[in-house]
């Protein structure tokens, strides 16, 4: 697969991964089109973090000053019992800013806006379109013919699918989602709530009951916060794309749970950004099929349980763009090297911490109480060196290539 001139590349998805790869491609002078189904950038969203290799990417792209300007002021995680009493704290300093409670915590929307702002001021061959998406594509030996929902038909040398865990582009080219998705025995919900008046500022606070974890995380706006609910549950088709059933499931889980459960439930129906989805892992053995390549959650989602989704998207985008720019007339070679260099990072980034949700969310009251005791002991000063080793980022030894 070769091109005789500078390639034309289509990126499907204007999220963090798609915008990261687009920025590097246009900086390299490669004509890039981005299509995003939403009609405008999506503000806010759940907090994500940058650590180890993903933070190195942001540094190399020259974006860390802008990222630090809008990052959350989060001191760490506080674990509370059903009465709101703190029994353990995990601070950012415990892990030198690279642990589960990271130095760079930032809302998804704010991080994406940093990339969008840089794209807007970068003088490069970029065509960015909101409210459009791929409706059909057909490959041949010389390119990809793409038909968009807008009715336009255009030809590209390479299509990068960065359209998320439920990628429509992946479904068109690689096959149905069921081939690649593994349900991880749970569901997660995120949504914005008014900040409770008595909430301790600058801490993500969380509480566990059998089979459920619920937390409140600070926003950059002190008036709002994010509710986070994790449910241990087998896959239930009735919950798919049914917000009423999803909210009812959360009510069932949190009613009588203590701490701020009722506060969260009181805001759930009126929140502007309710999100609910299964915890799923996406594994696609080959990230490229002809002239279509998968990036981020579309090709390698470890689920929110890993805390590494943004890191995988950013690192993957950096590698893919770097390899394309290195050999723009040999896209097949660039795609192969992208996968080869990314796999060692993915092997560690996709590992579930602590044995997965069955260990994180036990079903019995006794084991839940034992887990609280263990966390209190582990976070105590004498055992902090043990905790630091236990929670150390698994990707810390990954060596990011230079381009």
Image (cartoon, rainbow, N blue to C red):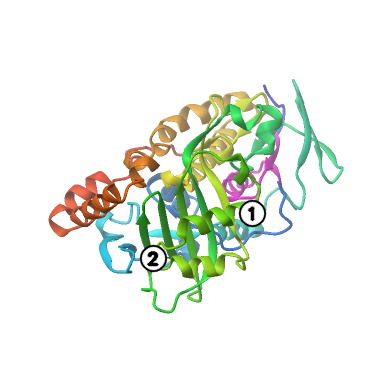
The quarter holding residue 178 reads: top right
* Visible residue check, residue 294: yes
Name the foreground residue: 207 vs 275: 207
Q: Quadrant of residue 308?
A: top left
Percent position (x, y) of residue 353?
A: 35, 42
Foreground mark, 2 or 1, reads 2
Name which residue lies at 65% across and 37% down: 160
Which residue carries the number 2 mark? Answer: 258
Write down the residue under mark 1: 243
Q: How many marks?
A: 2
Q: Nearer the viewer, residue 401 or 77?
A: 77
Left or right of 152? Residue 178 is left
Q: Is residue 29 magenta?
A: yes
Q: Residues within 10 Å of mark 1 (few under 14, many from 20)?
A: some
Q: Is residue 373 magenta?
A: no
Residue stretch rendered in magenta on the structure: 6-34
Q: Which mark is residue 314?
A: none
Residue at 50%, 50% in the rendered image: 188
Q: Looking at the picture, how far across and down is residue 151, in whole percent?
A: 87, 43
> Could you give the CA–CA distance between mark 2 and mark 1, rounded to whole angstroms?
24 Å
Mark 2 surroundings within 10 Å by alpha-carbon count, few (fewer than 14), some (14 through 19), many (20 or more): some
């Amino acid at each position: 697969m070769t091109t005789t001139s500078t390639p034309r590349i289509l990126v499907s998805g204007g999220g963090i991964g798609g915008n990261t790869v687009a920025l590097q491609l246009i900086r390299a002078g490669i004509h890039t089109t981005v299509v995003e189904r939403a009609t405008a950038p999506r503000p806010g969203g759940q907090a994500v973090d940058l650590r180890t290799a993903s933070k190195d990417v942001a540094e190399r792209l020259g974006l860390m000053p802008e990222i630090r300007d809008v990052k959350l002021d989060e001191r760490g995680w506080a674990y509370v019992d059903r009465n709101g009493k703190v029994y353990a704290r995990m601070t950012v300093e415990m892990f030198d800013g690279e642990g589960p409670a990271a130095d760079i915590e930032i809302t998804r929307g704010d991080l994406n806006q940093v990339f969008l702002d840089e794209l807007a001021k970068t003088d490069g061959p970029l065509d960015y379109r909101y409210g459009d998406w791929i409706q059909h594509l057909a490959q041949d030996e010389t390119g990809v013919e793409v038909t968009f929902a807008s009715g336009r038909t255009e030809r590209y040398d390479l299509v990068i699918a960065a359209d998320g865990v439920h990628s429509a582009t992946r479904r068109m080219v690689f096959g149905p989602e069921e081939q690649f998705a593994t349900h991880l025995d749970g569901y997660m919900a995120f949504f914005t709530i008014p900040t409770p008046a008595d909430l301790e500022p600058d801490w993500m606070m969380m509480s566990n009951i059998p089979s459920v974890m619920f937390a409140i995380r600070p926003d950059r706006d002190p008036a709002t916060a994010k509710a986070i609910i994790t449910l241990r549950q087998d896959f239930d088709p009735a919950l798919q794309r049914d917000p009423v059933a999803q909210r009812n499931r959360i009510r069932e889980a949190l009613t009588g749970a203590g701490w701020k459960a009722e506060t969260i439930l009181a805001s759930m129906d009126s929140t502007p950004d309710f999100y609910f989805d299964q915890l799923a892992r996406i594994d696609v053995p080959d990230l490229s099929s002809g002239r279509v390549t998968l990036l981020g959650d579309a090709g390698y989602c470890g689920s929110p349980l890993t805390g590494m989704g943004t890191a995988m998207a950013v690192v993957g985008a950096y590698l893919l763009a770097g390899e394309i720019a290195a050999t723009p007339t040999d896209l097949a070679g660039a795609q192969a090297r992208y996968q080869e260099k990314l796999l060692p990072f993915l092997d560690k980034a996709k590992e579930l911490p602590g044995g997965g949700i069955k260990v994180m969310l036990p079903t019995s009251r006794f084991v839940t109480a034992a887990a609280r005791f263990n966390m209190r002991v582990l976070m105590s000063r004498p055992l902090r060196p043990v905790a630091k080793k236990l929670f150390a980022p698994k990707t810390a030894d990954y060596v990011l290539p230079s381009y």
